[in-house]
Image (cartoon, rainbow, N blue to C red):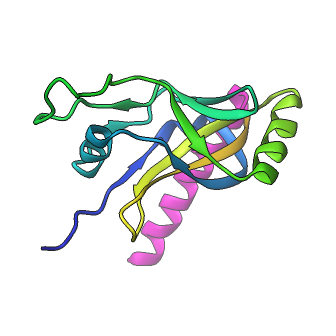
Amino acid sequence: MKPTVVNIKNKRAKFDYELIDTYTVGIVLTGTEIKSIRLGKASLVDTYCYFSRGELWVKNMHIAEYFYGSYNNHTARRERKLLLNKKELSKLERGTKETGLTIVPVRLFINEKGLAKLVIALAKGKKQYDKRETLKEKDDRRAMDRMFKR
C-alpha cells in the first residue's frame, strides 16, 4: 500500500510576510496527533511560533481530534514544542529580538521516515503596498505564461 502524501501549507504566510530564512524542524506529538496528520486533518491558519525558557513552541496549530481516538484523544489547538539544535535556536532567538521579525510556520509534511516535520521561516511583515506589488507580479507572470503557451 502506497503511503499518502501529506503537504499542508500556510498560504497566507508568503502573502503576509517576506520570508528571510527557513528551517525544517521536528514537532513533539502524541499518538493521536500523528494519526490525524497522516489523514491530512491539520491546519496552519493563524499559527505562530514563540520562545519560552529557551525553547521554541508553535501556538494555534489545529490538528483535528482523531476519529478512532478514545479518552486518549488530544486537544485540537494545544501548544506543541519544536525540535531544533541549540545553534539554530540561538540564531532564531537573536532574529526575533530585531524589530519587525517573527517566526511563522510555512508547511507541515511527513518525511520519508514517517516523521512529521514543520518548515518554519524567520519572516518580516509586509506593508499593504508590498502585498499589492506581490499580487501585481503574480498577475504579470500569469499573463506572460498565457502568452507563451499559445
Of 66 and 19, which appears nearest the observer? 66
The quadrant of the image that shows the N terminus is bottom left
Of 143 and 57, which appears nearest the observer? 57
Classify residue 14 by image quadrant: top right
Q: Is residue 102 left or right of residue 81?
A: right
What's the residue at 76%, 32% (across, down)? Answer: 54
Magenta residues?
126-150
Residue 2: percent from the left, percent from the top?
18, 73
What's the residue at 47%, 69% (across, down)? Answer: 145
Q: Is residue 55 left or right of residue 37?
A: right
Q: Is residue 16 left or right of residue 125?
A: left
Per the image, is 141 magenta?
yes
Classify residue 68 by image quadrant: top left
What's the residue at 87%, 29% (across, down)? Answer: 97
Per the image, is 96 magenta?
no
Of 13 and 23, which appears nearest the observer? 23
Residue 93: percent from the left, percent from the top?
81, 37
> Looking at the image, is 74 positioned above or below residue 12?
above
